[in-house]
Amino acid sequence: MKKKVISALLCVAMVSSMLIGCGSKTEEAPAAAETEASTEEAAPAEEAEAPAEEASAEGGSVYYLNFKPEVDEQWQEIAAAYTAETGVPVKVVTAASGTYEEVLKSEIAGSDAPTLFQINGPVGYNSWKDYCLDLTDSDLYKNLSDKSLAVTGEDGKAYGIPYTVESYGIIYNNAIMEKYFAMDGAVATSVDEINNFDTLKAVVEDMQAKKDDLGIEGVFASTSLLPGEDWRWQTHLANIPVYYEYKEKGVTDLDALEFTYGENFKNIFDLYINNSTCAPTLLGSKAVTDSMSEFALGQCAMVQNGNWGWGQIAGVEGNTVAEEDVKFMPIYTGVAGEENQGLCTGTENFWCVNSQTSEANQKATLDFVNWMISSDAGKDYMVNSLGNSAPFTTFGDDEKPQDPLAKEMYRFMENGKTSVSWNFTTFPSQDFKDDFGAALLEYCNGNMTWDDVASLVVTRWAEEKAATK
């Protein structure tokens, strides 16, 4: 099965599915959001080049290509604050969801290329190693709490430095759960009893049957399968079967994935789409913001997302979920021994400095990231604005994020459960993930069987891995 044939078939099927809407209309995100912090007025267009070269030669400047649209506003504020404090120009461009690689390819080749960009791990490094500066002697690397977290090259040197550690799982509204547990005939009496898929399934299906009494539209928020918004499933959820296959085989990567735990993926995915606020056939119009709003407004009891999702909950106008009721549970899929499973914890957020920009820009960029992890102002932004759990020795215990999901993340990291490591950084390509996500949408629309989806995962994995050799 060739990639072009698969993509063509999926695209034809997706066009018909996108004609049907569900819930509120989601506006299309712009390709990128851009702000340049500067203490001087912009020069006329014909004179713009000379001041830029002079700034670069004298002290350098910073251009950060940001990966996460949900924190664009915060990064713009940080850029302005740093420029006001140091006089160094900082520009932040934020790629729209699902377009980062495309934007980076376009920007890195320009005359005004990013000086600071992001890779998602070893696979990303292989794609961008020609642009990754050796950071082994940098303060950024020296202050890294666990040096093994860095992305290294074949020479053993550090080229990518993680700036946060994150967790994801099933976020739940404890107030709704407690209301259910108090009902006659509830199949469980507390969340503590939900430590495997069978129990989770029984609770969820009973809650769905009683959704009117619970005052919700569905147990789970809508499963966002709008193209570019499906990363929670084709990446984050897909990590779990890959994690268990790697674990079973004692490896950290595979050229050929057997998708041994594909049925486990199907278990939880079916539970999501069949006990939701939205019918499975109408999920192609749903974005992540839609599902997070549904949770924030109390329209559902659960949603799969990460600790970064707190801002998306708290920021919703009319939010009805109390901070103390926002909790985490692991994503159970029916694997033996999952009672001891914790949250999915790791990172795909690695800073890289452009090795092909000027030395002045490299120094300015290293100074900027060092300010982010060592100054009082920078650390405050890292923790309280960006919500990062920064893995650096420069942060004390009192400088950890205090939002409810961050607290839950630390609780799971410290309760003796086994965290599910992030292995999606070894997924072969964005094309693989996009094709997987498109297939999941067609599965929901009834246009593909699960066997078709599983076959596509195995085939496309092998094809894309081979293409990187």
Image (spheres, helix red, strand yellow):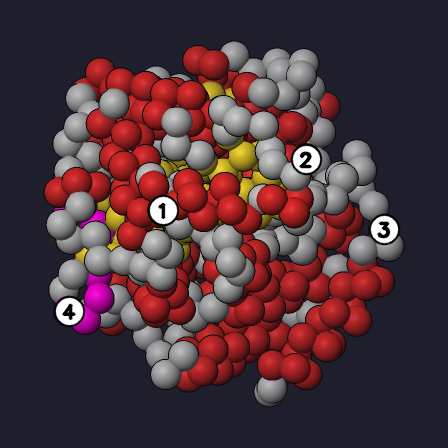
Q: Which residue is mark 1?
A: 57
- Residue 170 in sight here: no
Query: Which sits in the foreground, 331 or 237?
Result: 237
Q: Which mark is residue 290?
A: 2
Type of amino acid at the residue the image marks with label 4:
Asp
- Please indicate whether residue 106 sits to the left or right of residue 145 in the image: right
**Mark 3 and mark 1 in contact (Cβ < 8 Å)?**
no
Residue 256 is a magenta residue? no
**Residue 460 rendering spot, x and y as whole percentages:** 52, 77
Say few, some or many: other residues with alpha carbon within 10 Å of mark 4 (under 14 / 14 to 19 / 20 or more): few
**Residue 429 rendering spot, x and y as whole percentages:** 47, 68
Query: Which sits in the foreground, 357 or 66?
Result: 357
* Closer mark to the observer between disc 2 and disc 1: 1
Instruction: Look at the numbered disc 1 and give the secondary structure of its residue.
Output: helix
**Mark 2 and mark 4 in contact (Cβ < 8 Å)?**
no
Q: Which quadrant would residue 243 be assigned to in this image?
A: bottom left
